[in-house]
Image (cartoon, coloured by chain):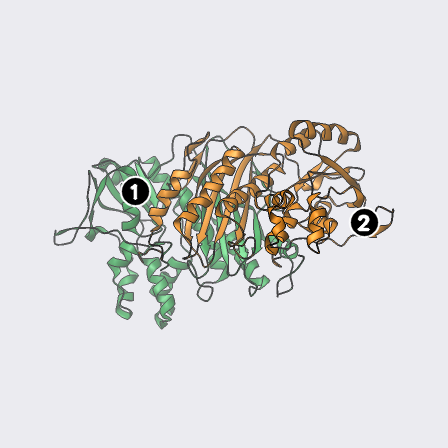
Chain colours: A orange, B green
Amino acid sequence: MAGSNRSGFSEDELLASIRKVLSGEGPGVVVGPGDDAAVLERGPGHSVATADMLVEGVHFDRGLTSARDLGYKAIVVNVSDVAAMGGSPRHALVSLGISRDVAPSWVIELFGGMRAACDEYALALVGGDLSGAPQVVLSVTVVGEVSEGHAVLRSGARPGDRIVVTGTLGGSAGGLLLARSGHPAATQPWGRELLEAHFRPAARVGEAATLAQAGATAMMDISDGLLLDLSRLCAESAAGARIDLSRVPVARQLAELSRVTQADPLELALSGGEDYELLATIGPGAVGDAAAKVDKRYGVPLSDIGEIVEHGFVAVDAAGRERPIEPRGWDHFGGE
Amino acid sequence: MAGSNRSGFSEDELLASIRKVLSGEGPGVVVGPGDDAAVLERGPGHSVATADMLVEGVHFDRGLTSARDLGYKAIVVNVSDVAAMGGSPRHALVSLGISRDVAPSWVIELFGGMRAACDEYALALVGGDLSGAPQVVLSVTVVGEVSEGHAVLRSGARPGDRIVVTGTLGGSAGGLLLARSGHPAATQPWGRELLEAHFRPAARVGEAATLAQAGATAMMDISDGLLLDLSRLCAESAAGARIDLSRVPVARQLAELSRVTQADPLELALSGGEDYELLATIGPGAVGDAAAKVDKRYGVPLSDIGEIVEHGFVAVDAAGRERPIEPRGWDHFGGE
């Protein structure tokens, strides 16, 4: 049963290399990587915990992403989920399955990317698991904290609330399209920005805390596309929504992309997924103040794109025409 | 990007079915499955957190294990890691990747098995992630708690300490051999006991707490084989070990197994792995009391199998002959 993979390194040898890049001695870490489990100090509030799995061939392509970007993104998508509850990330655990063709240097780079994201968002990588697998699989759990009674759920939206989103949408899906196309526009500034949106997304931790303080009634991050995620928020809140399509903040680089591909910028913004922007609802009187604070503190725009209604799910176009929305977006079974 | 797998169920539909079997409303669960993240109450002690990944074709064979047993075991192996720190499990998160040939009923059974293990060990399944994958991948994180300053690490063993193990060893590896052989002995009581040891292992939560209270200086669970795991404990403790092979508690059913296969019972007990028994070190004066308590409270034997020494890693056989040990066991890259 003893063995090593084709690259000739054993589990224990690789684990020893990985431990060197882990931040096991961060604040609150009593026992870091290397024992049966990590031991962590607890703050006074509640814990916030989330897990997300990235599978090669489904969520990423090893030919398109660097190990460093993949590790970075794996942390960010979980940090984004903690942020979307109004919480602060504290600790991460990683389970990694690697195939036999993966070089040790690739794994070290992957952990380097995770470490960079952990440093960026002030959390510690405290443990995990390493095993063989037919292809690369990366499962990250992030545990954070939120003040008691201050978590912002998906279920709190009420008719009359405004629907707001941070940043711009569609950039990540546009970046993926561009990466797959191999189009030389990838070297231009707008092309590089789209690639960055896909491979190095940001989590809106401070923005989420600001929205929570400003009175957001419901909040989630946009991982599977605006319309699909909004339909989930509405289902949890037992309400409907009316979206003003002309106010959806479409990533400006998509106009350039649409000149070199068949991409429809609005379609990418509505259903593209993986933007990790925040989708929130908030009383109409609080929108202006929230937008000013998010802009002032983080330089990030907050767009008011519509209203929560009693029922129904409709879009209004620039000409004022209404049409029912059929939510579409990333379905994790369907792949891309 | 919208889609469904070949069985015709969407992610949201399956998630709705799974949520029905989840224990999202257990004690301490403020927000359970269905939001961006779970929100959990914190106790006064420290958190204990561990993650483990099970990959089809590496850690299990869908033709040999039932979905229910697989789900049960996925929780138990993580509970065992929390127990081995002296902690109590509280909450579990699950990331599941499923291939297109997996039926919804299989997934529901898998979650049913996880729920059964969570009920058995008094923890709540509070969230996770579901996605497509080329084969089934299951990553579980368990978070628990331990009193401040009471975690039992791998690094605390000191020369003179006795080395103890709970229960018997080799049964899990014997069960896997038997399952793969397809031998009709699988229908006999001893055969069924070996299969149970492999497919439905127990985590020694109460036993670990008892050993911690009795003064265990180091502790871990035996997941990769006694010798390999003991070599890790010794490395962390900067010490050596001297094992009395005649005192290693070999699962009695392996004698029967060795009559119908080529299996060597002692070899399976030393290097078989996946027994999830506890390996601990404890001062010589405390062994008797610890063994009496573990037996009285849980009906589980505690065997004294050797001694921690300054350096070196040797085995003594029944005739008193010494030989150096070459640790062997499950390497997660090598497969089986």
Callouts 1 and 2 in the same chain? no
Is residue A244 visible to the viewer in this orientation of the structure?
A: no
Marked residue chain, label 1: B
Residue A80 position, x and y percent, is 60, 40
* Disc 1 to disc 2: CB gap under 8 Å: no
Q: Residue at x 62, y 36 (%)?
A: A204
Marked residue chain, label 2: A
Compare residues B315 and A241 and report the one nearer the observer. A241
Query: Residue furthest toward the right?
Result: A320
Q: Which residue is mark 1?
A: B233
Compare residues A278 and B224 and report the one nearer the observer. A278
Q: Residue at x 69, y 55 (%)?
A: A261
Q: Is B241 on the left or on the right of A175, as rendered?
A: left
Q: Which residue is mark 2?
A: A314
Q: Secondary structure at mark 1?
A: helix
Identify the amino acid type marked 1: Leu
